[in-house]
Amino acid sequence: MRTERLRWALTFVLCLAAAATGLAQRRYGGGLPSNATSFSANNKYDGRFRFVRLTYTCGGNCYYYRREPSWEHGYPLSEQNLMQIMSAITALDPHVEDSMVIGMEDPELFKYPVSYMTEASFWITNDREAASFRSYLLKGGFVIFDDFRDDYNRGSGGWANLEGNMTRVLPGLQWVELTPTDPIFHSFFEINDFNSIRQSYDVGRPSFRGLYEDNDPHKRLVAMANFNTDISDFWEYSGQGYAPVDVTNEAFKFGVNYLVYGLTH
C-alpha cells in the first residue's frame, strides 16, 4: 500500500511540476563566467534544506549547450522539480524555488550537507579547491555527480577527469561499481533493478559508481556518480511531455534516494 500511495503521489506532483515549469524563468542567462563562485540570487541560510549546485572552472568545449557553462546545464528546472517531489512525499520541507549555486571553496557550502555537480568531465580543479572540498566531504558532506560521459569530441576528460579530480580531493579512495544491493538504493524507495532507468540520449548502459569512506562499503558513501547517463534530464523536462510519466518517476526515485541518503548518513 505504501508503495502504491507513493507512486500516485509522484504522478500527482509531476502534474504540478508541469504547471510550474511552464512559468519558471531562468534567473541566470547563458554564457556565465565559468569560474564564478557566488551569486546575488543566493539567499541566506535559514536552516531549511536547499538544493546546492556546484559551480567550477570548466575546460574543453564546455559552452557547447546554449552557450552555458557545463555546470549550469539543467538549471534551475532540474532542482525545482526535484524539490517539488521532495516537498510532496517527504517531511523535509525544502525550499523549492531558491536553490544555491556555489563554489567548492565558498565557506557557505559547509552549511549544506548535500551538493550536486553536472558534467563533471569538464571540471577543472586546483589544490586549494580540492583541499576545501576534501574538508567538506570529510566533515559529513555528500556529493552527487550526474550527466557526464566519455565525450572526447567536445574536449571533455570523460570518466578519467572526474577520477583524477577526486583523487586530488580524497587521495586513496577508490571508485567502486555499485549494485542495487547498496544502501543508497533503499534509503527511501526500493530500487532493485537499474534497468528501471532509461537513457534520455546517452548510448549504452548507465554506470552507478561510488566512493566509500575508508574504502569500506559498510561505512558512509561520500560521493555518488551517475556515469554515462543524465538522470537529471528527466527531472528538468518532467513537465514537458518528453518522456512517459512512469519513466520520469523512476528518475525521480533515484534523486529522492540520493538526497535522503545524504541527509541521513
Image (cartoon, rainbow, N blue to C red):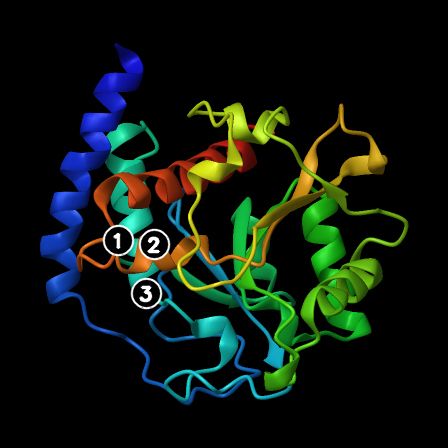
Q: Which amino acid type is shown beneath numbered disc 1?
A: Ala
Q: Horizontal placement of 91 versus 133: left or right?
A: left
Q: Is residue 206 above or below residue 184?
A: below
Q: Horizontal placement of 135 versus 41: left or right?
A: right
Q: Horizontal placement of 210 versus 143: left or right?
A: right
* Tag 2 near tag 1, CB within 8 Å: yes
Give the spatial CA distance, label 1 vs label 3.
Answer: 19 Å
Q: Name the residue beneath numbered marker 1.
A: 243
Indicate the secondary structure of the residue bearing disc 2. helix
Give the spatial CA distance, label 3 vs label 2.
Answer: 13 Å
Q: Quadrant of the C terminus?
A: top right
Q: Name the residue beneath numbered marker 2.
A: 234
Q: Where, by quadrant of the figure, is residue 200 drawn?
A: bottom left
Q: Which amino acid type is shown beneath numbered disc 3?
A: Pro
Q: Which amino acid type is shown beneath numbered disc 2?
A: Phe
Indicate the secondary structure of the residue bearing disc 1. loop
Q: Is residue 129 above or below residue 15?
A: below
